[in-house]
Amino acid sequence: MIPEFILFWATAAVCVVGALGVVFAPNVVHAVLSLLVVLFGIAVGFFALGSPMLAAMQIIIYAGAVVVMFLFVVMLLDITEVLPSLGGARGVLAVLSVLGAVALTFAIVAAVTSGGLPAQADAPGGDAATVGWGLYTDHVILLLLAAILLTAAADGVVGLTQRRESR
Amino acid sequence: MGYDLRPDLTWPEIAMLMLVVAVMFADMILRPERRGLLFGLSAAGLVAIGLGMVLSPHGVGTAFHGAHMADGFSWLVKIFMTCVLLTVILVTWPFLDRLRSVVGTHLILVLASGLGMMALASSNSLIVMFIALELATIPLMILTALGRGDSQAHEAGLKFLIFGAVASAFTIFGIALVWGYSGGLMNLTDLRGVVAAGGAGLPMTIGVVMLFAGLAFKTAIAPFHVWVPDVYQGAPTPITAFLAGGSKAAGFTALLRVAVALFAPGEGEAIIDWPLALAILAGLTAVLGNMAAIWQTDLKRLLAHASVGHAGFLLMGMAVIGTAGGLLGLSALAYYLVFYAAAVALVFFCMGLVSRAGGGDLLSDFEGLGRRSPAIAAAMLVGVLSMGGIPPLAGFTGKILILAATVKGELIWLTFIAGFAMVLSIVYMLMILRALYLLPPREGAVTGARLGRWEGAALIILSLLLIVFGAVPGPVLDPIREAMQAMAGLSPTEIMVAATGG
Amino acid sequence: MNILAALIPVFPLLGFAFIILNGKRLGERAPIVAVGASLISAVIALFAYTRVLATHTPLSWSFEWIAWGEGAIRMGVHIDGVGAVMLFMVTVVGTLIEIYAIGYMKGDYYYSRFFAYMSLFMAGMLGMVVADNMLLLFVSWEIMGLCSYFLIGFYTAKPSANAAGIKAFLTTRLGDVGLMMGIFLLWWTAGTINFEELGLVVPQLQMLGMDHLTLALTIAAVLIFVGTIGKSAQFPLHVWLPDAMEGPTPVSALIHAATMVAAGVFLVARTFMVFVNFPDALELVAVVGGFTALFAALIALTQTDIKRVLAYSTLSQLGYMVMALGLGAYAAGIFHLITHAFFKALLFMGAGAVIHGYHHVQDIRRMGGLRHSMPRTHISFLVATLAIAGCPLFSGFWSKDEILLAAFHGNRILWGVGTFTAFLTAFYMFRLYLLTFTGRQRDTAIRPHESPRVMTTPLLILAVFAFGIGFPGSPLMHFWVQGAIHPSYLPHTEHAVNLGIMGISTAAALLGFVLAVLMYGPSPKILPERVAAGFGKLYQLSLHKFYIDEIYQSVIIAPTVGLARLLFGFDQGAIDGSVNGTGRGVRLISGAARWLTAGNLQWYAITFLAGAVGLALIALRALAG
Amino acid sequence: MITEITTTHWIVLAAVLFGIGLLGVLARRNALVILLSVELMLNAANLVFVALGHHLGDVQGQVIAMVVMAIAAAEATVGLAVIVLVSRTCRTLNPDELTELKG
């Protein structure tokens, strides 16, 4: 199917370029914006994989909240100067970094391309109702744990900053 | 479809959840100078939960559609976790003045992390395990950075955070592969069947490798242990104790469940000989940790390296899975863990008391403590001796049990490596001992750290635990063995050999 | 009665706990607790060993310590013939030394703590003697090691005492690794660590005649013997014992002469079933023992510190015992262990009395003529000297003779070595005696005085033992001791008297005595200086203890320190550097710095990744295969 | 192979993104960018969940991906807070004093 073919390769290209941008962009702001590109790409991927609900959340939560938070911190700390990218890692460290990352990627790729995909089934609806039903019934334990984690983390982050004000 | 919330099985977690929320509200309501009461509330809640678990018969079964597994093993771990949390709160007590406005946050985070650890003990589903791990870890990261308001704690927090994030990325990617390539199985009991039938293909094995890397980070197994010294050193003392005792125990609990399900040999030749890999890593960890500990001047950093060494011993108990030493190994692991945590709590509590009186964390700050504060020094001595594996303390008994398991499991080379590591551990133990008793106090050293009545009682109780159950391990070991037998016995794989082979 | 036997080590343990917890309150009364605990143990032990020796049936009691599945580790006590004899020795000598210490340690700042340690030590030693399995034995063994460390370093103000304590602990610890591995190898091979069961199982395994079993058992035996080498200070791990003399003298007497160092010999005796049918292991034991006996005696010739002479003499005598066991002369080795314990404890206590009464001078070149000022010390010291030198009828004579007789039948070279060592022993002991007690006082600035009764009374009691303890094992009493301690798994041996051998060893001792009198007597005929010049290099070798310490310094310690530096450098460079790296990373964030050098947080990440990639690559083999 | 897009293609894409993220963690010199790279890795994992969930016809994949998003957000929040804190301490303290944390 030609459309799917184009969809995949376009998404892949956007994602990989964006990801490389995160790693190699000399400017922190550019790195954050590159991540934004990747996130959009992945959202498209989610959509292509029959999960429109997740695609929407990816854009709203990730792109809309998390990335903005990153940008906010960049502004707050006023990181404006141009940073060395991979050139910053010198000599052995750089070589080892690339080798390690490539080796692990190779291992995963080699493993998944060696065949052995499980039996395929019909795709379920990825709409909000299906996902929500799964989240609030069968997998409610995940929701509970994630909720308490977010609450505690929020309290903790407040504590981290509040402490500074009180001094 | 449905909630499948089995309150008879999950009530400890639910109670913990309510306790966290209660402390949160109390923190909002109470006036700042009365925040000491939060300690009382937390401790009372924990005692109630702990007693409840001790007194009520533990249920056996699953909740949340098999994601949550309640059995004797998880029950024991939860009781243990309650004790650890109580001790951490106790160890925090000397720092009350320093914590000031963040007392409430501190307690909430400790309890939330404890809830994560308890959920971890019962997690039968990989994804629940992941989220429970995060719930156990992320509050710890904040707690680390929440420390003394200095750059050390912040640095340590940052390092912990970055490493923890990378490790969790590994874990979740691994879980994704395992889940997908096993055909959508998330529960360990189901996955165990796949592995036992020889159905673990290469993609799934790579997934297990990545999952293992994440868990090995948590349990500080070499070479995934590198973050430990910096974080332990930089974190505030009570949190270091929590990391060394509770967090490590939680990690091992998870690893244990994974090991029983995924590492035991199945039909046909496994792609990775996990028991062998674990044995090699265990030997490496024990030797590396203890070796590095010898050259430390900061007591916390020393204990951090030492804790890596202990992780090596613990892993040895896991490496004998599937052999005749399997059951003994698992029981030894649990026994070792319990009393390692007790020793850690004892030592860090003593350090906290010295620190409160104005002392530092350097080894030289403890010189002549035997003369300055005999009671604290004596308690610390017991803890350190136990860690160093001196008979008849529990640390020794644990090491002997581990070694016996490796002997039973026909891993005599590992026994020898463990022996070597034991000698190394004696050396750093001796360094601490020397500082405590043989060297004279330095000029301007803190004299006579205060010791309240309750604090003294805590020291005595912890010391007695190490001495009594070291000499007579039966009362602790028997229930552990039964629980382990039940947990491992669920398996159709060769671990059954352990249950019957003796 | 059987369960009562298990209480023997418990009372000193309770004594220890009581003194440690009430140290300040007890103060001067601490020894009452310690001695009392020892006495109670001694009384129980008295019942135990009289019963065992009279009825020839061992006492045993045990309980299940750890159980798993069908396996279990049992803990318990087992007192057989050899255990009974050891119990007798340990309780008697131990109690007497504790009484002696009441006087010797008077006025010490840590008076009560000293007695606490001594009690703990007694508990360890008694525990080891009565243990019915290797694990309990090992536990007690470690307790002793720890006490030894504390007691050697007891004078905390002295840096040399500290160093000696650490040296002793680490050196013996090396041996302990061997022992522990031996225990586990034995467990793995024989399936049990209970001595009684081992006595049954090991001969059976041996009869199977399978090569790998024989090999495993031989290696286990050698590993166990490594433990002995460490604890009994045999060559090449002997270096710690002379330094251990930094401890208080009662410690030297109890731990480093009579009991703990003998524990190594006792260990070989206890596990003799593993040695007895494995000639390779036995030969190693015999050769190490013989060599140490000779080697230490040669060093003892030139030492001038009264306690060091005795320390090297202890090494030499322990070598004798080890050699005897290696020759298969089980009973002779243990018999010598017992007699040696009495006379060597006496010698040390005598030396302690001398040091005490001579204002803590330990150099024998500054002494002389002390027989007038210290009559009671003198007489007891003389008895002990005669005993160790092998003067007929004294205890040492009988036991040493047994060993030499066994050597004569077993290995003529070792017999030669033993006899020559006997000559050296007589020489250096009389040299010590003559320089200390006879002639004129060479350092007249010091006013010597006799020690108090509480110290000299134990000396005199021990002197009686040092003289008479040999008789039960002598031909005069038909080798009664040897019969009583003979283990069931050994074939019955005939004890005979060989007057020729007896004559030769007596002559060697006499020769040593005469030479000592000629050189160091009231009117020396041969000047020691001339002898020293004559022997030149040999004398230097002996004086410098064969440079063993120096060799260790250059061969072991220096490279170890080097390695340590290297590791420390790694720690500083990689780990510390990474902390600084974070510091710089932090600066990066705040815009303070741009560059980072290698050795930072990312190194950690790479280490982490290396582990994951390594495992993943192992998994990828499946693709290739 | 090129025309037919299978689930494996998506997983390979995820693996590549994971690898690039890992490279970022290893090579970048800035805690903030390291955190960004970790987000990349987590997203790669999500892609695997969704792809395999699609393949298996299991909605569980999407549910988990959603929860992972929440976790990632929590991690990012805490991470940013700590970074802000560290950077502030650094401004108020002499950076050379950071070397007091010695091994």
Image (cartoon, helix red, strand yellow):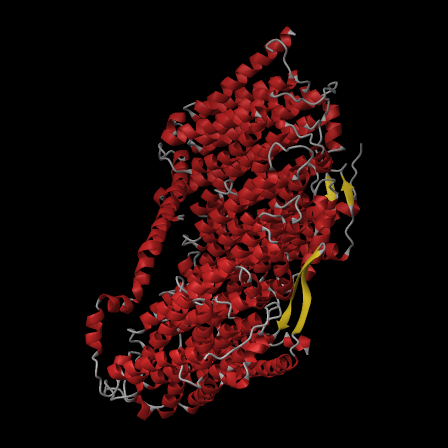
Residue at the far top: name it: A2
Total numbered labels: 0
Res. B392 visible in picture: no
How far from the left and from the top, in percent, is residue B329?
64, 50
Query: Along the line of sight, which residue is nearer the eye, C480 or C425?
Result: C480
Question: On the picture, is C547 further left or further right than D37?
Answer: left
Q: Is C400 drawn above or below residue C275 in the view shown?
A: below
User: Which of the pair A142/B342 is nearer the observer?
Assistant: B342
- Left/right placement of residue A157 relative to residue B334 reads left
Tell me the residue at 31%/58% (across/down): C551
> Is A103 rendered above or below residue B33?
above
Q: Tell me if I can see residue C524 in this picture.
A: yes
What residue is shown at x 72% (from left), y 51% (from top)?
A: B483
Q: Position of residue A130 (x, y in %)?
A: 75, 24
Whole-percent x, y for residue A10 in the image? 56, 12
Left or right side of B429 for B62:
right
Considering depth in this image, is C578 or B334 the residue closer to the camera? B334
**In the rendered image, which quarter is residue B468 located in?**
bottom right
Q: Is residue A132 above or below residue B231?
A: above
